[in-house]
Image (spheres, rainbow, N blue to C red):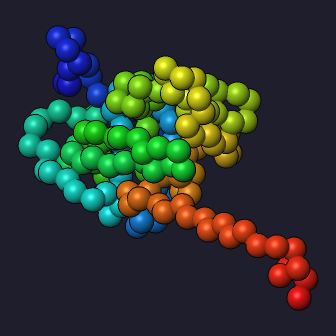
Amino acid sequence: MFSVGTHPLQANANLVFNNALTTTLVTWFPNTGGNHHVMPDLASMTSSKPYLGNDHLHVGDGWGLVISNITHSKIHSPKCTFTLSNILHVLDIKKPLLSIQKFCLENNVFFEFHSFLFYVKDHMTKKVLLSSWSRDGLYVLFESFATSLPQVFSSTCLSTSSDVWHR
């Protein structure tokens, strides 16, 4: 069991099956039913520590899955960097699950869901910090937004007269 403050929580998640991950990019599946972020593959994470406890991740059918490691990561977007702490590495999970509640608490944000897309907004300013859409009926934070390594966004703007462009 894990706890938040003085309240014990049993780790749980909704299980999603799909294809294997790439080694450097992560597609996170926002999960309203879980209280921990869950990752099946450590290749995309920068560091981890073996989990030495006896707890298991309990999924929708009540089955307990073994927690192998605990890791941390970041999601880099053009507007900010989001923290993901205490990610459970569970080999039997097929896709990375992002606990919406934990993500909101860690980053002082909230999710706004619409029919085919969602926004992550700053809790104080209400500004959109990240947006993505659904794929195959599931909301997804696509690879272009979620990486374990920072993305660099660069643009060079030069000013010149119109006659230079028409030579």
Check the image and report above or below for 4 versus 74: above
Is residue 117 something that shows in the picture? yes
Furthest toward the top, the residue is 6
Is residue 96 something that shows in the picture? no
Check the image and report above or below for 4 versus 16: above
Across and down, in percent, residue 65 comes to: 28, 40
Which residue does the image show at 49% across and 20% down from the upper left? Answer: 124
Which residue does the image show at 83% across and 82% down from the upper left? Answer: 164
Across and down, in percent, residue 132 comes to: 63, 42
Q: Is residue 151 left or right of residue 113?
A: left
Q: Is residue 130 left or right of residue 162?
A: left
Q: Nearer the viewer, residue 35 or 72?
A: 72
Q: Nearer the viewer, residue 154 or 42?
A: 154
Across and down, in percent, residue 53 comes to: 10, 37
Quadrant that contains the N terminus: top left
**How many numbered marks have been drawn onto this rendered protein structure?**
0
Furthest toward the bottom, the residue is 167
Which residue does the image show at 68% across and 70% down from the upper left? Answer: 158
Quadrant that contains the C terminus: bottom right
Q: Is residue 4 left or right of residue 117?
A: left
Across and down, in percent, residue 48 comes to: 20, 53
Q: Is residue 37 left or right of residue 68?
A: right
Classify residue 6 by image quadrant: top left
Which residue does the image show at 55% across and 32% down from the upper left? Answer: 120
Classify residue 113 by image quadrant: top right
Check the image and report above or below for 43 versus 162: above
